[in-house]
Image: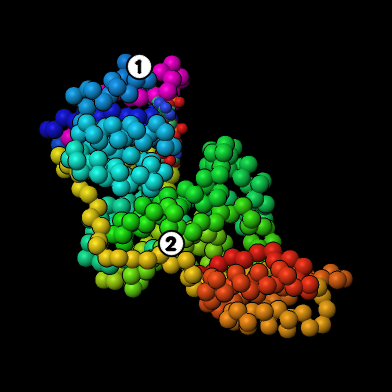
Amino acid sequence: MKKIGLALLGLGTIGSGVIKVLNENGEMIKNREDLDIQVKKILVRDVHKKRNVTVDKNLLTDDPEEIFKDDSIDVIAEFMGGEMPALPYIRQALSRGKTVVTANKEVIAKHWDELELEARKSGAGLYFEASVAGGIPLIKTVRRSLQANHITKLMGIINGTTNFILTKMSEEGRNFSDVLAEAQRLGYAEPDPTADVEGYDARYKLSILSTICFRNRVTVDDIYCEGITNISPDDIEYAKELGFGIKLLAIAKKQNGKIEARVHPTFIPVSHPLYAVRDSYNGIHISGDMVGNLMFYGRGAGDLPTASALVSDIITACQNGGAHHRVKLDDEQITFEDNWEDEYYLRLVVRDKPGVLAEIAGIFGRHNVSLNSVIQKLKTKDNATIIFITHEAREAWVNAALEEMRTCPSVLSVESRIRLER
Ligand SMILES: NC(=O)c1ccc[n+]([C@@H]2O[C@H](COP(=O)([O-])OP(=O)(O)OC[C@H]3O[C@@H](n4cnc5c(N)ncnc54)[C@H](OP(=O)(O)O)[C@@H]3O)[C@@H](O)[C@H]2O)c1
């Protein structure tokens, strides 16, 4: 029986989840894995705060040094969140040879190279399964079970908050701010929801996951990002009428030395497997050249699912003797594509007069954008809403066409431009 000294940095939602998992299943883990995981210290901001799990008060500290200098601590699990002071604490732990397990996507996405290097220097392990899609075992699966593949594409819903909001908007016909307020009341959205609704959280996760999948470093800056704040109930209704739903998708593709990586709201057909991923659930579709298509589904956040991934990392770290198993990147030179091809849903309000459609079709034509379908919707005395679904077109062509339309007197407004994946 191996005894492992564990320190926790944080005892909020996720830290409490880890304590619950160890309390409930610690004995089982001990028997099955021959590991006796003993919590030695817990770092918090306020040692006097009332906690929603019972822990020995003597374990709590607000002094990180007590943890770093304690030789009985082998593994440090971090779930404080944010960059500061989590980053220096992780760096400090690694440099002192202590293995780190973290749920912190922001720190890993932004500081991967530096932390990898620190881990390599000291030989301590760095594990971050819980940083992407909470309880869904993606990183381990890609690293340990898909080594025989070139992964060519991944596409998924990796932010539960925005999926909850879009599901409610679609199923209950409510607007964005109304559902956001409910998500905040239920604890699905933070008081400051920017990271979720602007797509930044999904971008951090996509940066980590696509790096692991493609074995090329995909930084946050390499990823195009657009959130859901401009999605209107009208677009959701039109999507339904056309047989689609709107999801915030994270998409990454690798082909012929080029990677494209992006996070944006996307029309997907109701027959698409990701359409069935509702509420705060996550779903990720991965394509490998040998295995074909795989789909993962589950809880992408929450105390127990995330703690399940963290405790699994703690166990793996102990079984690896705390050693660092670095993600070896390929030498291949790659470029990043930002002029990808997609179909588009476009909604315009135009003057209702003869010749307008021909004028708009002419603009699309001049920019190489061909149309799949055109539907005229709401019509008032003087104007009409028109929806266009394009064939596959380059991002730059569509943008140029919309730019020209904005200067066209017959076009009153370009209301929406949403990409479409079949
Ligand atoms: N919530 C989820 O569902 C979820 C899912 C996946 C990943 N994550 C990631 O897990 C991490 C933690 O999330 P959470 O929801 O558990 O956060 P949380 O509930 O806000 O808990 C944060 C904990 O960290 C402690 N802390 C914060 N700053 C500190 C400081 N400067 N010094 C000492 N302690 C400090 C807090 O101490 P006090 O309690 O004393 O204030 C608190 O216990 C984040 O990186 C998040 O992205 C969360």
Q: Which residue is mark 1?
A: 57
Disc 1 is placed on an element classified as helix
Is residue 168 rendered to the left or right of residue 6?
right
Q: Is residue 169 visible?
A: yes
Quadrant of the rendered structure where residue 337 is?
bottom left
Q: Residue at 37% of width from left, 69% of height from top?
A: 258
Pick whichever, 20 or 224, lies toward us: 224
Pick whichever, 291 or 326, lies toward us: 326
The magenta region covers 35-52
Mark 1 Cα-neighbour bin, 10 Å: few <14, some 14–19, many ≥20: few
Q: Is residue 48 magenta?
A: yes
Residue 378 percent coordinates (x, y):
77, 69
1 vs 2, front mark = 2
Pick whichever, 379 or 260, lies toward us: 260
Quadrant of the rendered structure where residue 127 is?
top left
Q: Is residue 98 visible?
A: no
In the rendered view, would you say 154 is above or below 52? Answer: below
Residue 386 percent coordinates (x, y):
72, 73
The image's mark for residue 261 is 2
